[in-house]
Amino acid sequence: MPAFLTEDLAADWLTPGPVEGEEWARLLADSAERVADGLEVYEVDRKVNSTRSARWDDPTLIEPASNA
């Protein structure tokens, strides 16, 4: 499962050391909510799922699909 981390929490997440489970659960929940508020969801072109018609570095893969 992915963890949605704010930039300030990412550094703490990557720092080795003991983890307080309840504290991290609270921090992750708060961080996930803040990150999710900034996400934008939109449909993309079907070529995203095709290994034949698209290159992995094609910038149009992340553009919203045109429903024309």
Image (tube, rainbow, N blue to C red):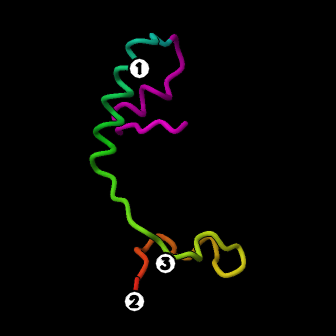
Q: Residue at x 52, y 14 (%)?
A: 17
Q: Earlier in the sequence, mark 3 or mark 1?
A: 1
Q: Earlier in the sequence, mark 3 or mark 2?
A: 3
- The answer to if 21 sits in the magenta stretch is no
* Quarter of the figure that contains the N terminus: top right
| Label of residue 68 in the image | 2
Amino acid type at image mark 1: Ala
- The answer to if 6 sits in the magenta stretch is yes
| Few, some or many residues within 10 Å of mark 3 (<14, 14–19, 20+) | some
| C-alpha distance separating marks 3 and 1 | 36 Å
In magenta, the rendered stretch is 1-18
Instruction: Answer with left or right where residue 44 lies relative to residue 48.
Output: left
Q: Tell me the mark number nearer the camera, choosing from 2 and 1.
A: 2
The residue that mark 3 highlights is 60
Amino acid type at image mark 3: Thr
| Few, some or many residues within 10 Å of mark 2 (<14, 14–19, 20+) | few
